[in-house]
Image (cartoon, rainbow, N blue to C red):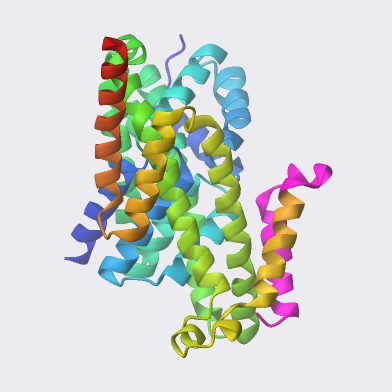
C-alpha cells in the first residue's frame, strides 16, 4: 500500500469533488480512476467495501469514503485532509452561485424559472424514493416501518432523528425476535 | 451565536441522515420550519442548485443553507458541521472494520433504519410537491379548483415520463431536466 502526503490527498479528493455531479453512485467511477488507477491508494474491492459502508452509515457517502481512504493511507490527519479536499470545491462553487443567485432572485424570469425547477425537484426526489424503496422495503416488517415513519413525519412535528433512532431499535427488535422463533 | 447553532444543526443532520444526499432533505426541511432561517420554497431551489453543480449533494446543500443563513462564514461552518460526524464515525469504524462489517447487530439496526430513511425522504418530497402544485392562498380562500396549479402538474407529468419511461433519456444527467424545467417555467410564467 502506497503512503500519501496530506496535500496529495487533499488535491486528489478535491479533483474527485469537482468532477462528481450528483453525488452517490456518480462518484464511484471518478474514485476508481483517481484513487485506484492513478494513485494506487486502494484496491477495487476495498473501494467497493468503503462505498457500501459509506452508504449504510450516517453522513454524506462521498465524505465517508474520503475519510476511509485518507485514514488508510495517512492516518487520522489523512482522513481529515481527504475530507476537506472533497468538500472544498462545493464550498467555493456553491458560495459563488448562491451569492450570484441572491442578486437575481427578484427578477420575474428567475422566479418563473425556479418555479419550473421546483417541479423538477419533486420528480427527482420521487425517483430517488422509488430507487431507495426497491432496496430498503424488502419485507412486511420494513414496509410497516416505512409506513409508520411516513405517517409519523407527515402528521407530527417530531425531528427526523427520532424516527431514525426508533426505526433502528425496531429493526433490531424485529430481527432478534424473528431469530428466536 | 448563529454559527454555533448552524454547526450544531448540521452536525445533527450529518449524524442522522442515512443513505446519501437526499436523506438530508427531511432534516433541512425541519430546520427551515423550526428556525425560519429559510423557507421550504428556498430549500427546493437549493436542492435544484445542489443537484446541478459538482460535489456531493449533501455537502452542497449544507454550504448553500449555511451561506443563506450566515454568509461565507456560515457556509464554512455548516459544511464543517455536516462532515464532522462522518469523520468521527468513519474513524471509529475504520479501526474495527471487520467486526463492524460482520456484526449482526449493526445489520439489524440498519435493516430498520433504511426503510425509515426512505419514508423521511418521501415525506419531505410530498412537502415540496404540495408547495409546487398547490396555491395555499387560493386554498385558504376555499377555492379548490383555482388552488391547483395546472401548468405545474402538466410539467410534473412530462418530467416523470421523460425520466422514467423514455429509455434514451433515463440515463441523462438531472441537470438536463432541471434546465428543461427552468425553460418551461419561464415559457409558461409559472
A68 or B160, nearer to the observer:
B160
Q: Position of residue A111 (x, y in %)?
A: 59, 79
> Which contiguous range is marked in magenta?
B164-190
Q: Residue at x 30, y 21 (%)?
A: B106
B119 or A79, nearer to the observer:
B119
Whether residue B178 is visible, yes or no, is yes
Q: Quadrant of the C terminus of chain A?
A: top left
- Is A89 magenta? The answer is no
Q: Position of residue A9 (x, y in %)?
A: 44, 29
**Residue B83 position by quadrant:** top left
Q: Residue at x 40, y 72 (%)?
A: B39
**Residue A145 position by quadrant:** top left
Q: Residue extending furthest bottom?
A: B141
**Residue A38 position by quadrant:** top right
- Is B176 magenta? The answer is yes
Q: In this view, does B96 lie above or below B20?
A: above
Q: Position of residue B49 (x, y in %)?
A: 55, 60
Q: Residue at x 39, y 24 (%)?
A: A68
Q: Residue at x 31, y 33 (%)?
A: B87
Q: Is residue A4 left or right of residue B88?
A: right
Amino acid at each position: 500500500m502506497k503512503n500519501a502526503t496530506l496535500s496529495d490527498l487533499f488535491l486528489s479528493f478535491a479533483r474527485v469533488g469537482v468532477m462528481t455531479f450528483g453525488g452517490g453512485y456518480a462518484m464511484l467511477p471518478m474514485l476508481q480512476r483517481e484513487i485506484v488507477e492513478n494513485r494506487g491508494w486502494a484496491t477495487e474491492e476495498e473501494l467497493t467495501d468503503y462505498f457500501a459502508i459509506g452508504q449504510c452509515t450516517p453522513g454524506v457517502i462521498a465524505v465517508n469514503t474520503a475519510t476511509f481512504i485518507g485514514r488508510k493511507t495517512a492516518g487520522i490527519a489523512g482522513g481529515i485532509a481527504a475530507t476537506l479536499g472533497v468538500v472544498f470545491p462545493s464550498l467555493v462553487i456553491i458560495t459563488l452561485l448562491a451569492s450570484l443567485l441572491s442578486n437575481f432572485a427578484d427578477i420575474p424570469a428567475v422566479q418563473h424559472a425556479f418555479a419550473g425547477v421546483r417541479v423538477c425537484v419533486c420528480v427527482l426526489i420521487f425517483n430517488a424514493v422509488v430507487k431507495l424503496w426497491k432496496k430498503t422495503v424488502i419485507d412486511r416488517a420494513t414496509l410497516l416501518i416505512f409506513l409508520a415513519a411516513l405517517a409519523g413525519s407527515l402528521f407530527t412535528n417530531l425531528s427526523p432523528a427520532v424516527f431514525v433512532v426508533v426505526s433502528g431499535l425496531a429493526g433490531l427488535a424485529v430481527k432478534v425476535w424473528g431469530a428466536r422463533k | 451565536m448563529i454559527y454555533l447553532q448552524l454547526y450544531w444543526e448540521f452536525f445533527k443532520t450529518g449524524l442522522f441522515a442515512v443513505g446519501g444526499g437526499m436523506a438530508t432533505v427531511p432534516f433541512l426541511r425541519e430546520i427551515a420550519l423550526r428556525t425560519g432561517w429559510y423557507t421550504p420554497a428556498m430549500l427546493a431551489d437549493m436542492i435544484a442548485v445542489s443537484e446541478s453543480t459538482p460535489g456531493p449533494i449533501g455537502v452542497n446543500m449544507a454550504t448553500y443553507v449555511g451561506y443563506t443563513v450566515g454568509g461565507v462564514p456560515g457556509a464554512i461552518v455548516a459544511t464543517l458541521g455536516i462532515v464532522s460526524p462522518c469523520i468521527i464515525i468513519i474513524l471509529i469504524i475504520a479501526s474495527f472494520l471487520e467486526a463492524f462489517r460482520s456484526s449482526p447487530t449493526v445489520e439489524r439496526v440498519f435493516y430498520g433504519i433504511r426503510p425509515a430513511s426512505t419514508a423521511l425522504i418521501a415525506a419531505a418530497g410530498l412537502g415540496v410537491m404540495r408547495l409546487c402544485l398547490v396555491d395555499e392562498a387560493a386554498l385558504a380562500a376555499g377555492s379548490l379548483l383555482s388552488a391547483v396549479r395546472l401548468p405545474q402538474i402538466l410539467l410534473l407529468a412530462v418530467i416523470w415520463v421523460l425520466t422514467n419511461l423514455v429509455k434514451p433519456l433515463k440515463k441523462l444527467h438531472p441537470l438536463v431536466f432541471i434546465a428543461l424545467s427552468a425553460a418551461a417555467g419561464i415559457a409558461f410564467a409559472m
